[in-house]
Image (cartoon, rainbow, N blue to C red):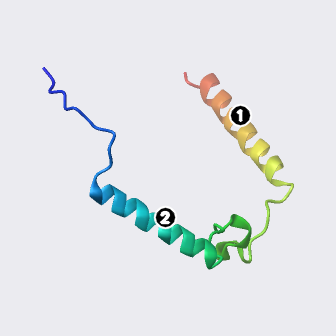
Amino acid sequence: MALFVKQTEERTKLQEKLAAELQERAKRTQQMGGGQPDTLDDSSYLKDTKDASPLTAVWIVIVILALVVLGVFMFVNRG
């Protein structure tokens, strides 16, 4: 049988203090102009990369067809 513990909706002093500190930190960050998150477009790991070529789809189709042919070959010759 489980023990039911009454939970109150009131915040403890520690919760109030933490909430106030986080709100203050968020306000300071916004005032400094640091409120904007880093997006993928300006990330440093995207330097010297390129988009996939149009032939990528062709290569995918070729690989799928090769796997299908291999599967058919193995099915027919399972002897």
Give the label, 2 or 1, closer to the camera: 2
Report the residue at 48% width, 69% height from top: 24
In x, y percent, where is residue 25?
A: 49, 71
Left/right of residue 36 with respect to residue 55 in the rendered view: left
Which x, y percent locates residue 64?
A: 72, 39
Q: Disc 2 marks which amino acid?
A: Gln
Vertical placement of 65 versus 21: above or below?
Answer: above
**Relative to 57, is 53 above or below?**
below
On the image, which quarter does residue 41 sit in? bottom right
Quarter the C terminus occupies: top right
| Residue that carries the numbered disc 2 in the rendered image | 23
Question: Secondary structure under badge 1?
Answer: helix
Decide: marks 2, 1 in contact (CB < 8 A)?
no
Q: What's the distance in space between the residues labelled 2 and 1, CA to CA?
A: 62 Å
Identify the residue shown where x is 80% and y is 53%: 56
Q: Residue at x 62, y 76 (%)?
A: 31
Residue picked out by circle 1: 69
Q: Percent from the top left, x then y, of residue 15?
A: 33, 56
Image position, residue 45 (x, y; %): 65, 73
Identify residue type, mark 1. Val
Quarter of the N terminus within the rendering: top left
The quadrant where residue 14 appears: bottom left
